[in-house]
Amino acid sequence: MTAFSDEEGKKAVEIARTVIERLVRKERMPDFDTPDSFKRESGVFVTLTTYPGDELRGCIGYPEPVAPLMDALKDSAVSAASRDPRFPAVNAAELESVKVEVSLLTPPEEIVVEEAADLPKIIVVGVDGLIVHRNGARGLLLPQVPVEWNWDSEEFLCQTCMKAGVGPDAWLMPGTQVFRFQAEVFSETEPHGKVVRRDLDGKDGCCD
């Protein structure tokens, strides 16, 4: 699944980095020159991690294609840096020790099975991201998360349920909806470093 070129992925990361830096420094946002693909509606997440510790520092985005990619990307960058309720806002001293990653998402599709117990057989770790809906609660985990934590597909389901604030076995219960999506993931190798397309099997490729 390749909807975006390496150059487009690199551009998305560069835009997210610029938006975050201008926000933190309280500087005027520039006008961005973007390809036509950034005008299409697309889901997107911006993830910030510490460097070199690689700990999560912020992650917010649009799970569904409800806005043009450019608008969703800029808003996600702002949110990841200043609105993630799990963390304080990024400050200027952190800008050189935070990596920026952008995940460009396919539209979520519900996984329909006759028996919920069959769900782990269908989910592909390293390919699929998950969204769980139950009784108005929703939890989402990007496809890179189970790879980073070495989860199998069943643990991935359980952790997504817990992200939604429901029990880890909620995916087995009637009334729970499970959706999957895929993502093209582009990440800085270090703050302001090269941007690579992340292969979740461990073979990253440079976008330069």
Image (cartoon, rainbow, N blue to C red):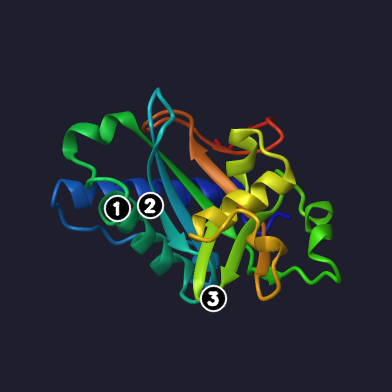
Residue 203: percent from the left, percent from the top?
Answer: 69, 30
Q: Nearer the viewer, mark 2 or mark 3?
A: 3
**Disc nearer the start of the sequence (3/1):** 1
Residue 83 percent across, percent down from the top left: 28, 57
Quarter of the figure with residue 145: top right
Residue furthest to the left: 26
| Picture layout, residue 93 above or below residue 136 | above
- Please report whichever mark, 2 or 3, sits nearer to the chain's N-terminal start: 2
Helix, strand or loop for disc 1? helix
Q: In which quarter of the image is the C terminus?
A: top right
Image side of residue 14 versus residue 26, left or right: right
Residue denoted by label 3: 135
Q: Name the residue under label 1.
A: 19
Q: Residue at x 54, y 76 (%)?
A: 135
Amino acid type of the residue that numbered disc 1 sits on in the rendered structure? Val
Residue at 42 percent of width and 60 percent of height: 73
Residue 116, position in %: x, y?
A: 79, 64
Separation of residues labelled 3 and 1 (CA atoms): 35 Å
Residue type indicated by callout 3: Asn
Residue corresponding to mark 2: 15
| The quadrant where residue 191 appears | top left
How dense is the environment of label 2, judged by Cα within 10 Å: few (below 14), some, or many (20 and up)? many
Q: Three-letter amino acid code at disc 2?
A: Ile
Of tags 3 and 1, the one toward the viewer is 3
Pick the residue in front: 36 or 132: 132
On screen, residue 89 above or below 206: below
